[in-house]
Amino acid sequence: MRILLVEDDQALGEGIRAALKSEGYTVDWLQDGANALHALKSEIFELVVLDLGLPRLDGLSVLKRLRAASNPVPVLVLTARDTTNDRISGLDAGADDYLVKPFDVAELKARLRALLRRSLNRTQPVVAYREVLLDPATQQVSYQGRPVSLSRKEFLLLHQLLAQPGRVLTRDRLQEALYGWDDEVESNALEVHIHHLRKKFFPELIRTVRGVGYLAEKI
């Protein structure tokens, strides 16, 4: 689970990142709104924790531009502003939830779990590809009617490829979907995941485009 944390307070940011990493989340941390907006446009995150009082570009502006670009990623807003109008402004701009500082880390974790459940329960089409069925909502996968057990990264990788048949996805793009900026990634990690997927399904499931990346052939 990859989370983008946008918080300019050094101590608070370090505390949140450590707490979420201990829960198994991959946490990428930025400290200003301009860099956050760039990251959200170019990379894949499953949740965003967004402070409103940010340098360069405030959190409310980041949120408005994110929603204007039709990015549906769930956003939990953090703020020291505790008036009703401030909360309304954040929710109207597209926030999914709102947490006022100071807060208990246990509550933050609970709210993120709730956001994730709601996100997974949104209607998402089941991906069907050559007898492979992949359900994004339940994260269940089957092949020829039989369930297939996948690791979290194998599921994310397979979803990326099958949802865009015929499109070559670069190594960089696929690694962005699987790993955070601080993750130590072995040079052959992507190839290992691809090998496992081919073994669990069939060799022709994923084609290597040398020097570029991978694709699932268009049916």
Image: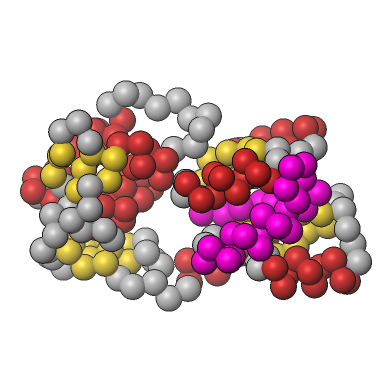
Q: Please give the name of the residue rendered at 45% of the width and 25% of the height, measured from the top-left corner.
A: 184
| Residue at the image position 66 percent from the left and 68 percent from the top | 94
Q: How is the image coloured?
A: secondary structure
> What x and y, as percent, mark residue 47?
57, 54
Which residue does the image show at 47% across and 46% down from the upper left? Answer: 43
Closer to us: 193 or 24: 193
Can residue 191 be seen here? The reply is: yes
The residue under the point 90% across, 62% down is 82
The foreground one among 61 and 116 is 61
Left or right, residue 209 beside residue 22: left
On the picture, is 127 further left or further right than 137? left
> Image quadrant for the C terminus?
bottom left
Find out whether residue 57 is within the magenta segment: yes
Q: Quadrant of residue 140?
A: bottom left
Whether residue 217 is situated above or below residue 42 in the rendered picture? below
Over which residues does the magenta segment extend? 45-70
Image spot of residue 204 (x, y percent): 8, 48
Whether 76 is among the magenta residues is no
Residue 53: % across, % down? 81, 49
Viewer-proximal residue among 115 and 164: 164
Residue 147 visible in rendering: no
* Left or right: 199, with 188 as reference point: left
Pinpoint residue 191: horizontal percent, then vertical percent. 23, 33
